[in-house]
């Protein structure tokens, strides 16, 4: 499951849990599309809670969305507690737009503060 838990003109927070399906993304992507139509740049926070994987179709839907809106991603913070999640974020940095950082779950407030700082200042992709 994935859901939007908070949004403002420059920020979207999502929570993902379980196995992410094409149906899950189909419920969220239309709202994200509307947001991107109104906002030139967006900061994302993705909170991963007990994520068990992603269906292939959902993975491709996500990639298509990111590619379509690659010029509007500013900062993306991924928050989770699993070692594989941090490794996946490090691997994905090579093709994700904007600045991308991973935060352990106990640093959720730090992740929110970081994405709230505004526009990114370059192509830094730190962890």
Image (cartoon, grey):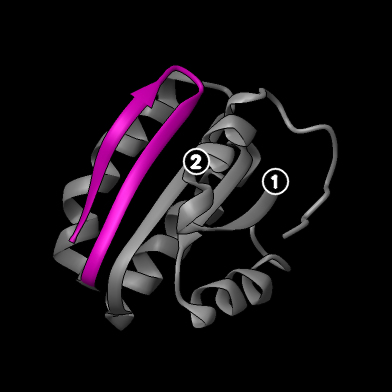
Q: Is residue 104 left or right of residue 97?
A: left
Range of the magenta residues?
1-18
Q: Which mark is residue 44?
A: 2
Q: In what quadrant of the picture does the C terminus appear?
A: bottom right
Q: Secondary structure at mark 2?
A: strand
* Relative horizontal placement of residue 83, taking residue 32 as reference (left or right): right
Give the mark count.
2
55 in relation to 76, above or below? below
For image coordinates 48% across by 45% down, the residue present is 108
- Give residue 16's position: percent from left, percent from top: 28, 59
**Looking at the image, is mark 2 or mark 1 nearer the viewer?**
2
Give coordinates of residue 68: x percent, y percent.
Answer: 51, 49
Q: Position of residue 44 (x, y in %)?
A: 50, 41
Judging depth in this view, the residue of 113 and 11 nearest the camera is 113
Mark 2 surroundings: few (<14), some (14-19) or many (≥20) residues within 10 A = many
| Residue 116 disc label | none
Q: Is residue 118 above or below residue 93?
A: above
Q: Residue at x 38, y 53 (%)?
A: 47
For label 1, the residue is: 98
Marks 2 and 1 close (CB-CB < 8 Å): no
């Amino acid at each position: 499951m994935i859901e939007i838990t908070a949004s403002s003109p420059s920020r979207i927070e999502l929570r993902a849990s379980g196995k992410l399906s094409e149906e899950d993304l189909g419920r969220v992507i239309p709202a994200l599309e509307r947001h991107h139509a109104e906002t030139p740049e967006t900061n994302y926070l993705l909170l991963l809670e007990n994520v068990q994987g992603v269906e292939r179709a959902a993975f491709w839907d996500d990639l298509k969305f990111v590619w379509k809106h690659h010029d509007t991603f500013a900062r993306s913070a991924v928050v989770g507690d699993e070692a594989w999640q941090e490794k996946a974020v490090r691997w994905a940095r090579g093709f994700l737009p904007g600045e991308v950082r991973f935060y352990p779950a106990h640093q959720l407030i730090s992740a929110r503060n970081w994405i709230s700082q505004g526009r990114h200042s370059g192509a830094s992709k730190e962890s």
